[in-house]
């Protein structure tokens, strides 16, 4: 039996990328300080707790509140928050995982850490919308557009204000998640990383996730 590729989806409450990798045949676990919106393997807590638990691939969506260029007018007032957010990104980039993708909007990661390897748009992956999304890749190929569609609506900018605005704006597009799983899973081979095949038990909550620490 082929070893199961183990995927950590860091900073994800929606379960979108996790479920796309699961559907493609991986063992995928999401991790967020928040609970998962959908049932499935999820560690509710700090991603630092589970980074060294033997993953083959990590897709990480670190918070962009203090990094996104769209919030540039507040930059002067949040120097320490920015430094902390950049340190979190550096820590994720340096995680002991063979293949890593970090996803963020256009942000100061580009000027303060390094330029992204790729900038994608939802309309390249079946959603008729614009939202420039940067990818910093380690040992992963650039994503190939899976379905270019006509629409170019800037939907995220038009979302009404409210307590859940950030949540709706930060949600990963399913078409992008499916492309990540389809294109990056075939690029990841658990056996090639020297791990033996193992049975992976689904995890649903913090207590069940303790064995991953
Ligand atoms: C920009 S949102 C990403 C949402 C993601 N695209 C999705 O579809 O669920 C960033 C997330 O990082 C989470 N987060 C922040 N610090 C974290 C930490 N230390 N460990 C795990 N998650 C963290 C936040 O709770 C937030 O949900």
Image: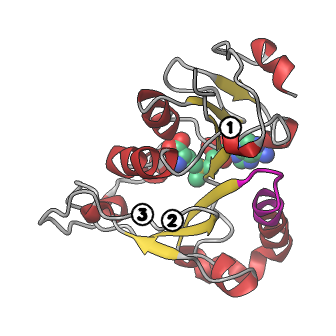
The residue identified by callout 3 is: 143
In x, y percent, where is residue 30?
62, 33
Quadrant of the displayed image that contains ligand 1: top right
Query: From which residue to which does the magenta span run?
Result: 88-98
In x, y percent, where is residue 199?
68, 14
Judge from the rendering whether residue 140 lies leftward or rightward of residue 195; answer left or right.
left
Indicate the secondary structure of the residue bearing disc 1: helix
In the image shown, does 196 or 24 lie closer to the viewer?
Answer: 196
The residue identified by callout 2 is: 141
The residue identified by callout 1 is: 191
In the image shown, does 132 or 124 lie closer to the viewer?
Answer: 124
In x, y percent, where is residue 65?
63, 62
Query: Is 137 a magenta residue?
Result: no
In the image shown, does 124 or 6 lie closer to the viewer?
Answer: 6
Taking the view exactly as shown, the residue that stands out farthest to the left is: 150
Numbered circle sitting on residue 23: none
* Mark 1 neighbour class, 10 Å CA radius: few under 14, some 14 to 19, many 20 or more: some
Q: Quadrant of the C terminus?
A: top right
In the image shown, does 70 or 172 lie closer to the viewer?
Answer: 172
Indicate the secondary structure of the residue bearing disc 2: loop
Circles 2 and 1, Cβ within 8 Å, touching? The answer is no
Q: Is residue 163 visible?
A: no
The Cα–Cα distance between marks 3 and 2, rounded to whole angstroms, is 6 Å
Q: Is residue 74 visible?
A: yes
Among the 4 quarters of the image, the one containing residue 87:
bottom right
Circles 3 and 2, Cβ within 8 Å, touching? The answer is yes
């Amino acid at each position: 039996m082929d070893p199961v590729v183990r995927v950590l989806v860091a900073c994800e409450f929606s379960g979108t990328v996790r479920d796309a990798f699961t559907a493609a045949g991986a063992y995928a676990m999401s991790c967020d300080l928040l609970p998962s919106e959908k049932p499935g393997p999820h560690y509710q807590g700090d991603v630092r707790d589970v980074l060294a638990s033997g993953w083959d691939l990590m897709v990480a969506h670190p918070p962009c509140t203090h990094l996104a260029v769209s919030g540039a007018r507040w930059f002067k007032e949040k120097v320490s928050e920015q430094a902390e957010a950049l340190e979190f990104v550096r820590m994720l980039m340096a995680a002991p995982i063979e293949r890593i993708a970090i996803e963020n909007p256009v942000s100061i990661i580009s000027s303060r850490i390094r330029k992204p390897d790729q900038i994608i748009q939802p309309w390249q992956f079946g959603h008729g919308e614009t939202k420039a999304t940067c990818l910093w890749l380690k040992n992963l190929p650039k994503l190939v557009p899976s379905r270019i569609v006509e629409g170019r609506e800037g939907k995220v900018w038009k979302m009404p204000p409210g307590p859940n605005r950030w949540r709706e704006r930060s949600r990963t597009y399913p078409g992008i998640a499916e492309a990540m799983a389809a294109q990056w899973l075939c690029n990841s081979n658990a056996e090639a990383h020297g791990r033996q095949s193992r049975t992976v038990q689904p995890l649903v909550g913090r207590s069940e996730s303790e064995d991953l620490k």
